[in-house]
């Protein structure tokens, strides 16, 4: 009997220790800042429970032993107590911490204060997602069934516009409710591409919505991918838990949607009971388009050496005959569509998990993008080259928390700078300093606005002004080209195919655009951005440079 009990304890202890090690490793991969503290805290409590229960267990075991002399030895009792505690503690940890209603969930984070009905705020963004590839916005290709189902419970904004056509400047605007020129990310010279790539970062003096919500008592967490959204660019500010697998020193170059989702689910299982702000960013629709679930027969339709990277297009395919270029464009669009389909599948897993953990009804959930994608609509590829519709208009689906009334469709033009102000409003947080946006309207016809956009990544600077009726684009004169002003009628030409001739609306809109452009230049000069090319750039690691190369931002 004694040997049997000793063997049982040894197996239990070994299994418990292995389980604890594997669990700690798994949590560490998902949320290193959260898992170590939470696991240590909960394990201590579980250990104490095991220690308190061990005398009773020891008494039961002692009655069953046939060797009273050994049972009475102090060292034997100590070993048995220790083994019992080690065996019991992980079981208590699993049963009480990992279950949604576990008894020790309160050991991980404080509970909501009585009467605190503030909603959770969940922002899900998908890099380079075009509006016209989403079923809820009219696509007939069936790429986004989960997003479309979500739209049935959400408010669909038909005309949501970003302030810039690429990631760093667009998200700076979205998270601060300021235009790039007021975020220290506006160039005052016609072109400074390398400054954007190697030196540009969010100044510490620009307040972010994450910081504001953290001060308001929200737990803040971010699961991101994209090498422009790393802590070295300033994005960790205001986040209690921040993870970007595309950051320097980590192996993944392009973190896929499956990893982003699984990491987020790990955080949700250990989520706090106090209100939280969670930002999740997917990168998959960004170049290079190479979904792991692309049908082999689709890829086999085209030459095997074709690549879907910006550098490949501008260095190779742009100089092919017209028939080859048309076929290459078709190839890129199909490969892009598969990336959208793949992202939607994992987005569906995330949305399902939010329901399962019981946070759906009391959460504001937003699905949107930082910019669209150029698929040769106006002769360019990828993004950052222009301010046309395919880049500035983004999907915006908002599922409001229970008790908040809103229409299912908003048609007027809205700016993505209104998103942080919506968070501030629902969280009851103080006003965000320097914010220019207004909370998103919940009724048609209210709160429509003009959206000013700036900050192209490639080529001379451009600016744009989007209204409910018109879209104006200004390309200032450079050494290679004269001043260019384009006007499109959004009511009849949403794809911006035909620029209108001079007219009274064109003249008035031009004046408003030039006025905002002048103000933006003045704001940018205060940051002395144009001089920062001479400053010490961000110390990008070799891994980060490889990521920039993989994304097509830099060549070999």
Image (cartoon, grey):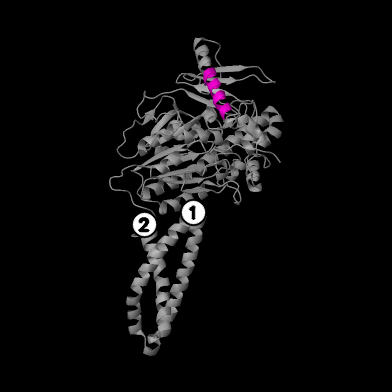
Provide residue 425's location: percent of width, then percent of height.
36, 35
Indicate whether residue 15 is drawn in magenta.
Answer: no
Q: Quadrant of the N terminus?
A: bottom left
Residue 518 painted magenta: yes
Task: Work out whether 529 lies above or below 536.
Answer: above
Question: N-terminal of the two: label 1 or label 2?
Answer: 1
Q: CA distance from mark 1 to mark 2?
A: 17 Å
Q: Which residues are magenta?
A: 513-526
Left or right: where 383 falls relative to 238? right
> Mark 1, residues whose alpha carbon is within 10 Å: few (<14), some, or many (≥20)?
some
Image marks 1 and 2: residues in contact by CB distance under 8 Å: no
Percent x, y of residue 498: 56, 17
Side of 20 relative to 382 (left or right): left
Residue 4, can we see it?
Answer: no
Disc nearest the viewer among 1 and 2: 1
Q: Which residue is mark 2?
A: 105
Q: Is residue 165 left or right of residue 16?
A: right
| Residue of label 1 | 33
The image position of residue 222, as x and y in percent, is: 48, 45
Q: Say how many tags the image has.
A: 2
Tell which of 426 and 314 is nearer to you. 426
């Amino acid at each position: 009997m004694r040997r049997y009990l000793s063997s049982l304890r040894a197996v239990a202890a070994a299994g418990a220790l292995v389980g604890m090690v594997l669990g700690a490793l798994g949590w560490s991969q998902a949320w290193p800042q959260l898992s170590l503290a939470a696991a240590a805290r909960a394990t201590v409590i579980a250990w104490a429970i095991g220690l308190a229960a061990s005398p009773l267990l020891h008494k039961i075991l002692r009655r069953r032993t046939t060797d009273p002399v050994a049972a009475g030895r102090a060292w034997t009792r100590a070993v048995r107590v220790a083994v019992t505690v080690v065996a019991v503690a992980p079981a208590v940890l699993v049963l009480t911490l990992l279950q949604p209603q576990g008894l020790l969930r309160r050991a991980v984070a404080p509970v909501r204060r009585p009467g605190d009905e503030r909603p959770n705020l969940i922002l899900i963004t998908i890099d380079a997602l075009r509006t016209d590839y989403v079923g809820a916005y009219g696509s007939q290709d069936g790429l986004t069934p989960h997003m479309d189902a979500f739209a049935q419970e959400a408010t669909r904004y038909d005309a949501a516009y970003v302030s810039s056509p690429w990631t760093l400047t667009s998200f700076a605007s979205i998270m601060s409710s300021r235009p790039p020129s007021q975020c220290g990310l506006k160039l005052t010279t016609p072109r400074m591409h390398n400054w954007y790539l190697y030196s540009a970062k969010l100044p510490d003096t620009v307040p972010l919505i994450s910081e504001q919500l953290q001060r308001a008592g929200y737990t803040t967490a971010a699961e991101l991918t994209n090498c422009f959204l790393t802590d070295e660019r300033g994005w960790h500010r205001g986040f209690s838990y921040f993870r970007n697998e595309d950051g320097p020193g980590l192996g993944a170059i392009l973190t896929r949607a499956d990893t982003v989702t699984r990491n987020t689910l790990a955080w949700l299982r250990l989520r706090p009971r106090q209100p939280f702000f969670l930002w999740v960013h997917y990168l998959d629709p960004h170049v290079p388009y190479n979904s792991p679930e692309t049908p082999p027969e689709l890829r086999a339709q085209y030459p095997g050496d074709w690549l879907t990277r910006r550098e490949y297009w501008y260095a190779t395919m742009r100089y092919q005959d017209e028939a080859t270029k048309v076929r290459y464009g078709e190839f890129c669009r199909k490969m892009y569509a598969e990336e959208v389909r793949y992202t939607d599948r994992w987005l569906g897993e995330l949305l399902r998990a939010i329901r399962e953990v019981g946070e759906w009804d009391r959460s504001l959930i937003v699905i949107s993008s930082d910019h669209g994608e150029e698929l040769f609509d106006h002769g360019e590829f990828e993004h950052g080259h222009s301010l046309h519709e395919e880049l500035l208009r983004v999907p915006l689906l908002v599922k409001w928390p229970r008790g908040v009334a809103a229409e299912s469709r908003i048609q007027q033009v809205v700016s993505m700078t209104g998103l942080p102000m919506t968070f501030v409003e629902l969280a009851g947080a103080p006003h965000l300093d320097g914010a220019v946006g207004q909370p998103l309207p919940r009724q048609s016809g209210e709160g429509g606005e003009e959206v000013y956009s700036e900050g192209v990544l490639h080529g001379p600077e451009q600016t744009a002004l989007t209204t409910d009726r018109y879209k104006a684009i200004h390309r200032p004169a450079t050494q290679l080209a004269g001043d260019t002003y384009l006007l499109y009628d959004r009511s009849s030409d949403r794809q911006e195919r035909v620029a209108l001739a001079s007219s009274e609306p064109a003249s008035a809109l031009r004046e408003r655009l030039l006025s905002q452009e002048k103000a933006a230049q003045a704001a940018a000069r205060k940051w002395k951005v144009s001089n920062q090319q001479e400053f010490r750039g961000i110390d990008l690691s070799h891994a980060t440079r490889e990521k920039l190369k993989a994304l097509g931002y830099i060549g070999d």
